[in-house]
């Protein structure tokens, strides 16, 4: 009985989705278990309405605040980018399960945080534009985050068909209205714009700006670089990347804020560039004493040579080279133009001959050196046999 193998063809989109989900799960297991994921969802629910209300200006600042709170609760340094990526992965899984349930299909894998995402303030691609699909005259309302509805004054949307009217009729009606009711038009009050008041941020919220390094943290960074750079030079630390990772871990444990190795490296490069910059030589640099032990003195330009010093740039003739016979022709002022051109051409020709002769000797020396190497390799191969 012969063995028969069946070939199973799996569609490529299914393979790509499975690989992406597996990679996301493996990356998430390193930082986020069930407890940490619930903490991340709770922090996102608390701070996302503050971004829409204006208390937190940018989404980047919100993720930095979430990362700092996550560090205080679980004593684990997770960067803002990883928090954002984790929420995106959870949002993608929630939307997939929601779409399958809406279609009446049974999902292959249940989303474990489906109940927590029911009231999640997710990002919407398409927002409702008032009056876009309505009639010529319409009204709308604005909703605050306190679930209070405030009516807004009616908004008029003009269609293109209404614009195509007789200009004379429009001007006559406007003039008649101005003549009949001059006081009403002068006393017309513009509709007030309703603005939602900004909610103050909570007192326990730690807002981290774009500047991570004040003077205290910068001095700590310089001291840590001095300490671990010596170990790197002694090969106790193998790579620069590992060294910056250790420095970032020390900074995070000292100041209780998430700092990555790339931020520490970029900050030290900025310090070095400002320390060695020529425009700053006139005034004292803030961290000059600390950086002098690492990068040396702030000498940018080479020392000026005294005018009394004389250099002899004449090439001394070597005894090994054979003298070359070169015919030199001097231009005769009384010669004809043809003779002058011939003299110049002969000089150029002699220069080319000398150049190519020397070039040919150099190439011959290279070829002889390659032949010697080839013969030595052949001898070594014979000895190995």
Image: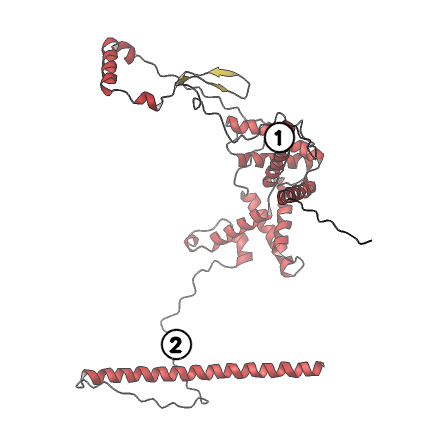
Q: Residues within 10 Å of mark 1 (few under 14, many from 20)?
A: few
For mark 1, give the secondary structure.
helix
For mark 2, give the secondary structure.
loop
Where is residue 225? Give x, y as percent.
60, 53
- Residue extending farthest to the right is 1
**Corner quadrant of residue 135:** top left
- Residue 91 visible from this viewpoint: yes
Q: Which residue is drawn at 42% across and 65% down?
A: 303
Q: In the image, which disc is placed on residue 99? A: 1
Would you place residue 223 above or below residue 90 in this image? below
Q: Nearer the viewer, residue 4 or 341?
A: 4
Would you place residue 325 above or below residue 280 in this image? below
Quadrant of the frame with the C terminus: bottom right
Is the C-beta separation of discs 1 and 2 under 8 Å? no
Seen in the image, is 200 located left or right of residue 22?
left
Would you place residue 179 above or below residue 50 in this image? above
Where is residue 161? Give x, y as percent.
33, 22
Where is residue 267? Give x, y as percent.
53, 48
Q: Nearer the viewer, residue 45 or 218?
A: 45
Give the number of the mark in front: 1 or 2: 1
- Residue extending farthest to the left is 334
**Corner quadrant of residue 314:** bottom left
Seen in the image, is 325 located left or right of residue 13?
left
Q: Which residue is drawn at 54% across and 51% down?
A: 268
Alpha carbon separation for disc pair 1 and 2: 84 Å
List the residue tagged with mark 2.
311
């Amino acid at each position: 009985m012969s063995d028969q193998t069946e070939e199973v063809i799996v569609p490529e989109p299914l393979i790509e989705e499975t690989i992406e989900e597996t990679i996301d799960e493996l990356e998430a297991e390193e930082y986020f278990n069930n407890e940490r994921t619930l903490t991340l969802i709770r922090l996102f629910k608390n701070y996302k309405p503050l971004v829409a209300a204006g208390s937190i200006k940018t989404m980047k600042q919100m993720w930095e605040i979430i990362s700092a709170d996550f560090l205080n609760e679980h004593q684990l340094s997770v960067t803002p980018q990883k928090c954002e990526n984790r929420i995106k992965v959870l949002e993608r899984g929630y939307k997939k399960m929601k779409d399958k349930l809406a279609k009446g299909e049974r999902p292959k894998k249940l989303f474990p945080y489906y109940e927590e995402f029911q009231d999640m303030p997710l990002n919407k691609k398409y927002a409702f534009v008032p009056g876009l699909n309505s009639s010529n005259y319409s009204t709308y309302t604005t909703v605050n985050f306190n679930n209070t509805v405030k009516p807004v004054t009616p908004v008029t949307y003009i269609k293109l068909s209404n614009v195509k009217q007789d200009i004379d009729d429009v001007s006559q009606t406007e003039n008649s209205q101005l003549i009949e009711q001059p006081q009403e038009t002068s006393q017309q009050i513009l509709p007030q714009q309703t603005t939602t008041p900004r909610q103050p941020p909570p007192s326990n919220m730690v807002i981290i700006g774009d500047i991570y390094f004040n003077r205290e943290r910068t001095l700590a960074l310089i001291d840590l670089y001095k300490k671990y750079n010596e170990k790197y030079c002694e090969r106790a630390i193998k790579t620069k990347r590992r060294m910056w990772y250790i420095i970032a871990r020390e900074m995070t444990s000292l100041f209780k804020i998430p700092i990555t190795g790339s931020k520490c490296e970029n900050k030290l490069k900025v310090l070095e560039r400002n320390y060695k910059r020529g425009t700053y030589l006139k005034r004292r640099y803030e961290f000059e004493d600390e950086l002098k032990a690492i990068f040396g003195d702030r000498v940018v330009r080479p020392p000026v040579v005294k005018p009394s010093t004389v250099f002899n740039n004449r090439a001394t003739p070597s005894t090994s080279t054979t003298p070359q016979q070169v015919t030199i022709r001097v231009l005769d002022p009384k010669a004809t133009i043809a003779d002058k051109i011939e003299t110049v051409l002969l000089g150029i020709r002699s220069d080319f001959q000398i150049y190519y002769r020397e070039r040919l000797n150099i190439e011959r020396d290279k070829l002889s050196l390659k032949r010697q190497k080839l013969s030595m390799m052949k001898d070594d191969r014979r000895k190995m046999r």
